[in-house]
Amino acid sequence: MRHETMKNIIVLLLFVLSATLSGCANDQYAIEKQYYQAQKQAEKIFKNPHASPPNELERVVNILSKFAEKHPQSNLAVEAEFNIARLYIVKEEYAQARTQIQKILDKYSKSEGACSEALFLKGNSYEIENKWDAALLQYKKLMQDYPITLRGLDTPIYIAQHYKVKYQPDKMVVALQEAAVHYQALAAKYPKSPLAYQSHMLLAQCYIELKDWQNAVSTFSSIADTYKDKVNADGVLLNMALIYNRELKDKVKAKEALERLSKEYPRSRLIKTATALLKELEKK
Amino acid sequence: MGQQAKAYNTSIKSLKNHPALFLPFIIFAILEVITLIIIYLVPQMPLRLVLGPVIRTFWGERFLHYPANFLLLPKLASLSRMGLAVIFSSLLSGVAVALVFAVYNKKQIKFKEAFRAALKKYSSLFIVVLIFTLLFYFLVRLVTIVLVSYFIAGHSRLLFLKAGLWMGPILSAINFMLALLIQSAFVYAIPLLIIEKQKLIKAVIGSFVLFKKLFIPTLILVGLPMLVYIPIIVLNSKTAFLIDKVFPEFVLWVYFFGIVISSLLIDPIVTVSTTFLYLLNKEQGIGL
């Protein structure tokens, strides 16, 4: 009798254990596991889109769609929807991809982050098709409608980089100048905010790309003064020193920037580099 | 080879004829499996509420999500095994030695008596296992820190070998050798505590003396079974690869089989064979 009771207890414990280990629960972890398994299926197509069988795309899109429908509140549902669009892009089904992207724009219209990513992906789909003008329209719309999202902030530089990669220096210069104006306007509209800081950093990057060294160091100097209590500006000061030394050949100002870095950020990870550079400047 | 062979022969016969000798190791294996299951379930409700903040504080939010939790699992399992070894394995090894002594004296195996004998010496057993566990942990960390510092300083090679080799298979081999040497040095402390009823310091020193006298036989008895664990060590070092190329839960299975191999194969053979080696040498008058 005791033996029989022990046996029943063991069977019950094993059942509970296997139920727990199999992830029957519908908590966040279980959702992540389901998404990971769906994503693994998608990765097979991403790795080799031309080699995957024709019905494979439909099967994986179905899995991702069902996941998004089953867990609409989860962040991973958005990711699943985006991956459907990306799958269509890699399989060169651009019309389907843009239909999916429009579906994302409609479904997540209240989420600026999601919409900005969707517009960016739409632009990418035109770029991959070598329809730059159509892509540019999407990127401009993104900059206009969602300027303060992460994607919106990066897009002006992205456009300039496109022209750089395509060896179109004139268009690159124009794009960088437009980007500089855009970032100046953003920084002015949201002064002393994290957005303004980010805009100033991107503005400095534009000036560097334009080889406008004077404006670049001015911008860096402004960042170091305005945000010194809010962010670590050691990198900014080092960049200033490097530009003064290498491009403007102004060793005095370079030294000043390095000395300021050493004084204001004595525990910075850049101290060794700054000290070595100072020694080099003092030798010359 | 005579002593080792005789010790192994006696051990295998004893384990076959007296399966109760496995009992302390089975208990420890069960504790390890329970701990492993808890570690696996930490990212899930309800354990996430209690243990989630600990993981988040020490290792980061990322390890509370699938499948990144499996990247941390071997480390957590290893740390918990250290804790379990100090608290429980110390006592259970004492019980195992007491059972082996009973078998050697051709007495009836009585688990309760062996447990009582080990419990009397629990504080000493605890300290012995704590010492060699901490010694192993800190030596491994020291070797790792030295190597990492050397390569971070800008050196690309050490003794003509690249950093990747040093931080990979060579470091694993060094850790294996450290485990072998430390375990061998302390392996006789438990028989001396339980069988000779010696005090802690005398037992530890006695273990070092015996290790020196029986250097090669001890290394063979401890090292040979440990070789079986090498595939587990190799697999545990490739966690990211296993998660990506096989499936994430494979890491859990690797560790589970690691428990089976270490607690149900290596530990019984090492404990029983070294205890028999000690007793056989004592019989021949080769002792302290």
Image (spheres, coloured by chain):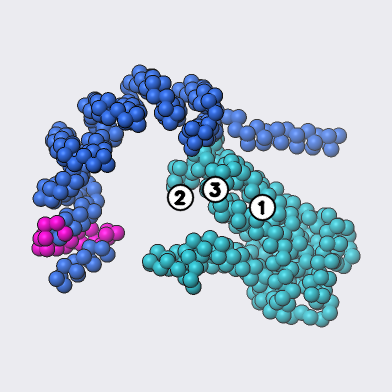
Chain colours: A blue, B cyan
Label 1: how many residues lie within 10 Å, few (<14), some (14-19) or many (20+)? many
Q: In front here: B35 or B141?
A: B141
The quadrant in which the C terminus of chain B is found is bottom right
Residue B63 placement (x, y as % from top left): 49, 44
Q: Which residue is mark 3?
A: B241
Q: Earlier in the sequence, mark 3 or mark 2?
A: 2
Answer whether residue B200 is visible to the viewer in this image: no
Q: CA distance from mark 3 to mark 2?
A: 24 Å
Question: Does residue A260 lie above or below A168 as drawn?
Answer: below
Mark 1 falls within which chain? B
Q: Residue at x 84, y 79 (%)?
A: B284
At label 1, the amino acid type is Gly
Q: Indicate the amino acid at tag 2.
A: Phe
The magenta stretch is A246-271
Find numbered disc 3 in the image and state the secondary structure of the residue it sits on: helix
* Quarter of the image where one finds residue B269: bottom right
- Give the residue number, with chain letter if any, for mark 2: B58
Q: Are marks 3 and 1 on the same chain?
A: yes
Q: Quadrant of the N terminus of chain B?
A: bottom right
Of residues A238 and B117, which is closer to you in this image? A238
Dominant secondary structure of the residues highlighted in magenta in the image: helix
Q: Residue visible at 78% across and 66% down?
A: B273
Name the mark on residue A50. none
Q: Position of residue A36 (x, y in %)?
A: 52, 34
Q: In which quarter of the view is residue A195 placed?
A: top left
Write down the residue under mark 1: B258
Left or right of residue A52, residue A12 in this image: right
Residue A90, how many percent across, how many down?
A: 43, 31
- Label 3 is placed on what type of residue? Phe
Q: Can see residue A84?
A: yes
- Label 3 or label 1, whichever lies nearer to me, is 3
B172 on left or right of B15: left
